[in-house]
Image (cartoon, rainbow, N blue to C red):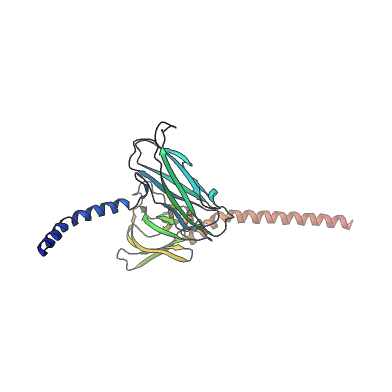
Amino acid sequence: MKTKDSYLWRLRRTRRFLPLLFVVCTFLLSFSVGVHPAAAGFGITPPYVRSDRLTRGTEYTQQINLVRSDPEEDLKVDVTINIPGVDGWFSIDKGNEFIIPKGVTQMPIVVTVHVPTGADYNDYKGTIRIRTSAANVQSGSGVSIALGAQIDVDIKVVDKIFDFNVRQIRVADLEEGILKWGLFFPGKIRFFMIIENTGNTTFGPSKVHFDIYDSNGENLLESVDNTNHIEQIAPFATKEVLAELPTRLPAGSYTVKYTIYKNSDVAQQGQISLSIAALGSVPGYEGYGFDGLSLTDKLKVAGVLGAPIVILLIFVTALVVRRRRRSKKKMNGYSSR
């Protein structure tokens, strides 16, 4: 006969095992996150190839990691691509058959999608199947256990998308400008940006603008734009690019409020510190050449270089006119005879 006391005793006993049960469940859950297991001892991560921003003529890559827990022998891998109508767009960097060597627990493969220029705007779905087996098992010599996994493919071909993210920025050391030959060559600000192109066509920052203030950030001293062409980034790529901006400020510490433009839109705004060093204090520094001169100084250069050319043109024109007059006089003399 069950009593209330015996029920309470069993309940207390059961509660003792709850922490252990919680630990076991947590371990199993953490082991399963991040790796897509297809069978014991083998899995892939991530288990998909996805992109909704592909367009005609672009190339998209994604790394897939093949993971196994028991690397005691060579493992043969066979890859089968099944994306209806577009199998030919997909390729594996290691081919459709390759070996995971003994002792290797994780091997990356790269899936590349080549979208043709005449591709239809559409959704494309399918699978890439990974099948593994022991590489050294011969016919009749034993049993080979085949393990496998599946990569789900879901891509979309759309019209062109122009977009990017600014991941990181930095400013290189620079020196103040210098006066030579009556011309002022400004200091060169080298503003580096790590840009991730999240669109599906070549794109990047169109312009960088600096508002340079005193060290307290109160008084605006100078406003400048980049003078160089900023390199554009390939679709889905991440790269560091450079904007060069002139400054005519003396050596000192300043506060900069910068703006990075995405065509006419603002991609990012922020504030950084700028330190301009004295002449000759930055090893390997190269300032601006004639491309950094102000409009006034460029006109001076144009005047100096252009004056001889203008004089030569005037001389040549006068000589041609004189010869034409002589020829005309001779023609008139013949006609009067």
- What is the residue that sits farthest to the bottom in this orientation? 218
Residue drawn at (48%, 66%), measured in percent from left and top? 264
- What is the residue that sits farthest to the left in this orientation? 5
Give residue 183's position: percent from left, percent from top: 45, 56
- What is the residue that sits farthest to the right in this orientation? 337
Specify the quadrant that holds the N terminus: bottom left
Give residue 203's position: percent from left, percent from top: 49, 57
Left/right of residue 21 with respect to residue 59 in the rendered view: left
Q: Can residue 18 be seen in this view?
A: yes
Residue drawn at (88%, 58%), measured in percent from left and top? 336
Give residue 147's position: percent from left, percent from top: 40, 43
Specify the quadrant that holds the C terminus: bottom right
Q: Which of 329 and 66 is in front in this view?
A: 66
Give residue 43's position: percent from left, percent from top: 37, 47
Residue 160, compared with residue 100, is above or below; it is: below
Residue drawn at (15%, 60%), measured in percent from left and top? 11
Displayed quadrant of residue 2: bottom left
Q: Is residue 257 visible?
A: no
Across the whole image, how many numbered discs are drawn on residues? 0
Left/right of residue 143 with respect to residue 119 in the rendered view: left
Residue drawn at (13%, 59%), measured in percent from left and top? 12
